Amino acid sequence: MTDGTAVRTPSMAVPASLRLLGRAGGLENSDICGYYVHSGWNEGHATYLQVGSHTALMFRRGCWVIDRQGVQDSEMAVAWAKDNGALAPTASTFGPWFIWSESAQDFLADANLIAIDAPDVTFISRRSDISGEYHFAGLSDGSPYYANGDMLIRYHSEGRKWLVAGTEHKGNNCIAFAEAQDTPHPGFAFLKWHVWNGATGQWNADANCHCLAAPSVIHVLGRHAQACNARICGSYHLAGLREGRPLYLLPGKKAVIRYASETDRWLIDFEALAEPGILGRILQWALKMETGDAFSAFADARGTFHPGHVFLEWHVWETAQSRAVLDPCVRATSAPQKLQVSGRGHGQENGDISGDYFLVGLHKGWPAYQQRGTSMAIRREKKRWVIDREGLRDSLTCVAFAQATPGFQHAGDGGSQKWHVYDSRAACHALDVAIQVRADGPEESSTKRQRIECVSTSAHLGA
């Protein structure tokens, strides 16, 4: 999941990310295709940067351009498209891209190249077999589809519905559905989902079933163990929707992270699930926002759709001072529990950087990872992710580095395609294209996901 300083709600006209697709791999300049994240604004329009490169998709001098050299004021570009009258170059309002052809010495139209708004999503339901994180898997009939093991979320064009179905289900056969309402992807909070009940042979509207462009788990880190309300730290799991934003619960505790529209804040309340129940606590939040027992910590939302952004600043309740005090060390992040570094052989110099790295906390406000049993760490240093065998220190010295892509919170999500590793013979860092840093798969509950056995697990929408 991405992170950034701009507004990031699924209902925004400006998506947090875009996927540029459709240019065949064998064609000239096909490398412009990929995943782009919102990085700022230019001439009143959104600017996007490609993950793993300097390539920018931006509005410049009255048209959309793709520039390999990044955000700059230049007449040079690898591709361009006419102004679509919108703040972002999404497919629904867009004409063809014109791509530079070296042989023709001109820009040629490519009707297949499109930019789509298709973030990864999390589906939450009483049914564990369809719940979890779904990742973008491709396009079908011009719309994105998502995969989670043998489960898919896909668009059914005839019925204009988003369907949750198994890979074996065809047509409109599915387990759950929502009327699409012209949404570009299924991760909009206002969609109403219906789930098939095999026991009754009916479709049931389920107000607790949601598909959201939000991470399944958020980690709150950084509060000193001896400080007041250090208990706010932990891994919070997506559990529902409140006031149009995700609601996260801390398993085994009474704590929630919830959006409060009255003050446009994210709140951590450690007594939310105590009597008189969560509905009663929500009323207390609204009526007693400034009192000490109303929350344990808060952060101004700054337009975010979920609280897992490292740039949010958290104020934690200090009993001794009877007020909430800013703690610059506290951050909430959607970074995974584990990263895996691969591609560097153990027989090569610095081959020991390969292996599993586990989330150990924060370093300079960013998620930090370390190999177990060693001091080898992955940390953020200015605009780079670095691998340092000396651990979490304040230094530019490192074994390997990659440029950090704006909008990403960890090395396994952005910039991991181009790692440079120190070569003692050349006395410098050299590019190693084989290295990959990947996030672990979606975090799951301790209970393994299993298919629910019922009279019928799916049905045609006409049933």
Image (cartoon, grey):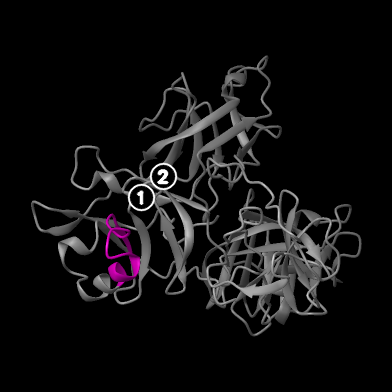
Quadrant of the drawing holding the N terminus: bottom right
Q: Nearer the viewer, residue 420 or 330?
A: 330
- Of marks 2 and 1, which one's residue comes earlier in the chain? 1
Q: Secondary structure at mark 2?
A: strand
Can you say whether 3 is above or below 220 in the image?
Answer: below
Give the amino acid at mark 1: Arg
**Residue 23 relative to residue 249: left or right:** right
Q: Which mark is residue 331?
A: 1
Quarter of the image with the C terminus in it = bottom right
Q: Between 199 and 271, which is closer to the camera in this rendering?
A: 199
Q: Name the residue: 73% across, 76% down.
A: 161
The circle on residue 366 is: 2
Does residue 251 appear anywhere in the picture?
yes
Q: Quadrant of residue 73?
A: bottom right
Badge 2: residue crowd in 10 Å (few <14, some 14–19, many ≥20): many
Task: Say if mark 2 contacts mark 1, CB within 8 Å.
Answer: yes
Residue 6 visible in the current orientation: no
- Chain part drawn in magenta: 266-282
Q: Secondary structure at mark 1?
A: strand
Which numbered circle lies on residue 189? none
Q: Amino acid at mark 2?
A: Trp
Give coordinates of residue 288: x percent, y percent.
19, 72
Q: Quadrant of residue 196?
A: bottom right
